[in-house]
Amino acid sequence: ATSRIGVTGLAVMGANLARNIARHGVPVAVHNRTAERTRKFMREYGGEGEFTAAETVEEFVEALERPRRIIIMVKAGGPVDAVIDELAPLLEEGDILIDGGNSHFNDTRRRVERCERDGLRFIGTGVSGGEEGALLGPSIMPGGDREAYAEVEEIFTSIAANVDGTPCCTYVGPDGAGHYVKMVHNGIEYADIQLIAEAYDLLRHVAGLDVPAIARTFEEWNSGDLESFLVEITAKVLAKTDERTGGPLVDVIVDEAEQKGTGRWTAQDALELGVPLTGITEAVYARTLSSLREERGRASGVLRGPVPSEEKDRKELVDDIRQALYASKVVAYAQGFAQMHAASRTHGWDLDLGAMATIWRGGCIIRARFLDRIRDAYAERPDLENLLTVPYFTEATAKAQDAWRRVVMTATEQGVPIPAFSSSLSYYDGYRRERGPAALIQGLRDFFGAHTYHRTDAEGAFHTRWAQDGTEVRTDT
Ligand code: NDP
């Protein structure tokens, strides 16, 4: 046994993680279900570090020092269980299995228990940053067995991205906490991307900018509060000229957004927890609507929109859109963090949300300047219930709100859909209101279903005998 760690699953993510680890001087055993992939890996990258190629699981397990540390980087779902089933009988007490794929946190909770029963230790870890991150430094979100994490901490923190001397990797919490946080990270990524797409749509179809001008606009925005990986690459994608047509590449890409499911999981879990998560959920719906391409094609010939009005002051509108984007982004993050806060309570994870903002500052897709502010907010108030209430964000949204409202009004007038912009603003307005119209909802529920209501001026539950004499009765005594 000569390898300190093993990686099984050598598609893009596994291969790049293995190379990253080896480049840090750690001997790595590599394995893949289909051995040809392992051979190809060795042909291409075998010289980059100290690798042991294993064609069978037996050879793979044999190659590892004890306690064995095995990173599983295969397709999420059934394949992860298949790999665990194959490995478990060959492993010994205390060996560590690490699932680095995008597994659902409930699967991870189940696998942690299963491994405990077999005397094994399990870590479910989020790995963000895509192909390039895996190779050059991802953001790593490990959860599960804490003592097992201590056995891989040195390797993980050395291969992770690093911002101002702090590695983008920290122990997240027990059982499924790591994969949960990765799920919300991906959900926030959906919201961020949707907001950027809406801003692009408005710049193009309401402000009337052409694609190269929009690319330059995003490039400019990337030197301010919006500075982030996603805004940076938006400028690059928009600036790309298509080789075949000579026009912008974006104009020949089919407008159907695909998804692998982590955004949907985030929205589903928000519904389960009872947390309002409008930004991410609208982003999932927007992708779903985009994928009804043929239906949209038919509807476009039938449904009528508004008559386009005259051009607005372009320069002012462009800056309004920037501000609306920033404010909506604040809301999307506030909602995502509120969801993690709620999940942490529900599952007893004791998540350190400031640490999450810290490890997302580098390596991952949602890395942004803005995360420093979130980290600072939790440093000051670790039990913060909503980011919007922190002075920095209170000020930011207050400053942006006039522009934000103008953008939502203009887009609505012009018939340009902005589900994430407008739902974020509605959430903001709903959240800042002391008294809302839900009183009427309760009245209606009591009318048709005798569901009762609470009074503002008395304890207890009440019901009005709507169908009888209209008198009110207290029902909880
Ligand atoms: P894929 O999700 O495309 O999975 C392919 C790998 O899974 C191959 O090594 C394949 O082996 C293996 N595999 C599939 N089924 C089985 C099985 N039943 N038993 C054993 N092995 C199996 O690979 P990626 O590298 O794209 O992703 C790996 C994980 O990382 C996924 O969970 C993904 O969601 C996650 N992830 C991906 C990111 C990305 O940017 N791609 C970013 C962050 C996370 P074989 O060669 O034999 O077919």
Image (spheres, rainbow, N blue to C red):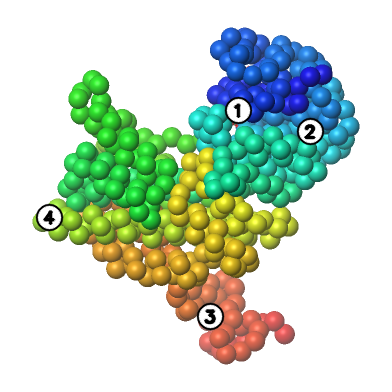
Are the residues flagged by discs 2 and 4 in contact, CB closer than 8 Å? no
Disc 4 or 1, which lies upstream in sequence? Answer: 1
Image quadrant assignment for residue 67: top right
> How far across and down, in percent of the image, does residue 315 sit?
18, 56
Which residue is under mark 3? Answer: 467
Q: What type is the residue that disc 4 sits on?
A: Glu
Disc 3 or 1, which lies upstream in sequence? Answer: 1
Label 2 CB less than 8 angstroms from ligand 1: no
> Tag on residue 20?
1
| SS type, badge 3 | loop
Image quadrant assignment for residue 9: top right
Determine whether 235 is above or below 33 in the image.
Answer: below
Q: Residues within 10 Å of mark 2 (few under 14, many from 20)?
A: many
| Residue 248 visible within the image | yes
Disc 2 or 4, which lies upstream in sequence? Answer: 2
Q: CA distance from mark 3 to mark 4?
A: 56 Å
Q: CA distance from mark 1 to mark 2?
A: 20 Å
Q: Is residue 113 left or right of residue 186?
A: right
**Looking at the image, is mark 4 or mark 1 nearer the viewer?**
1
Disc 3 or 4, which lies upstream in sequence? Answer: 4
Q: Residues within 10 Å of mark 4 (few under 14, many from 20)?
A: few
Determine whether 244 is above or below 329 in the image.
Answer: above
> How far across and down, in percent of the image, does residue 127 sit?
60, 37
Q: Residue at x 86, y 34 (%)?
A: 94
**Looking at the image, is mark 3 or mark 1 nearer the viewer?**
1
Which quadrant of the frame does ligand 1 lie within? Answer: top right
> How far across and down, in percent of the image, does residue 250 sit?
28, 33
